[in-house]
Amino acid sequence: MPGSTTGPPMLREHELAGSAQGEIEAVRAEFIVPVASFRDPMFPGVTRCLPVPPPSTLRGMLAAATGRASEPVPLGMSAWAEGGGIDAETYHPVNADGSNPAVGGRVRAVKGGMTIRDRPFLAMVHVTVWVPRPDGQRIAAALRRPVWGLRLGRSQDVVYLCSLARVMLSPAEEAVVGHVLAPVGGHADSGALTVRLSQTISQDRLTGEFGDFLWCAEPAGRQAVAGAYRDGEQAVWLHVPHR
């Protein structure tokens, strides 16, 4: 998929409503997803599962809640899964030339037709999202009464909202990193993985914006951070897509 390859821009304090001390009012939403699978678009034709949902996937879920075509809002996120596995998934690709049309949503099992592939998945995925003002309150209201059902990744992967809270994010020089998604250079934890994720996807799905992020499979402890806020002791980085 074509798209820009710049890293996520750092959020400057004057871009959001906050107090004179640099604090930002935000809404924190916590979700749990019993089963989810986030296909890595960097491996076309291969069902490689990302270890964490891309920001674009979370923005799509928020757009389903609000009923808007997109939600390119600043957001912070943390995610981890209790486990995972591999499932057998049936694919019914439709030929562009119409030589093997779908009947009742199924195509014949011929060359290039119906096939079964292994599909890795994550189990009991815990996701936390922070959305600052002025969008936070609007999205919080939509999450209570969503326009469309909340799903994350595949259409069958239902999301459950566990809690909503209004919080203050304070500028931080030191905080607990945990499983939060951070920009490259945001911290120096030795256990961090660099993951390439989509920030946004165009409505026609032909273009997207991608960036490199840091994420820890094992929860990282308290340490020096750069360009971060904190919610209590938890570090939070707010990721802003290029408009």
Image (tube, helix red, strand yellow):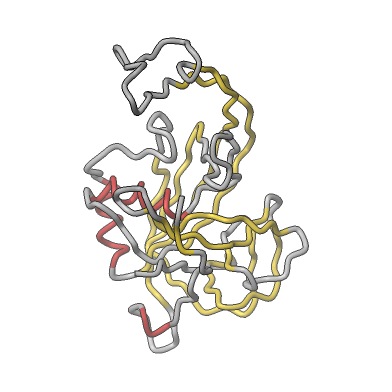
Tell me: 190 left or right of 39. Answer: right
Q: Quadrant of the image for the C terminus?
A: bottom left
Say which residue appears at 42% left-offset and 20% top-offset. 92
Tell me: 101 left or right of 108. Answer: left
Relative depth, front residue between 190 and 165: 190
Q: State which quadrant residue 72 falls in.
A: bottom left
Say which residue appears at 30% left-offset and 48% top-offset. 204
Q: Position of residue 202 (x, y in %)?
A: 34, 54
Tell me: 93 left or right of 180. Answer: left
Q: Position of residue 155 (x, y in %)?
A: 38, 32
In the image, is residue 7 above or below residue 13? above
Say which residue appears at 28% left-offset and 62% top-offset. 137
How many numbered badges does the structure rendering display? 0
Say which residue appears at 38% left-offset and 24% top-offset. 95
In the image, is residue 36 above or below residue 140? above
Farthest right residue? 190
Farthest bottom residue? 20
In the image, is residue 229 above or below residue 62? below
Relative depth, front residue between 81 and 110: 110
Q: Position of residue 210 (x, y in %)?
A: 49, 59
Relative depth, front residue between 41 and 181: 41
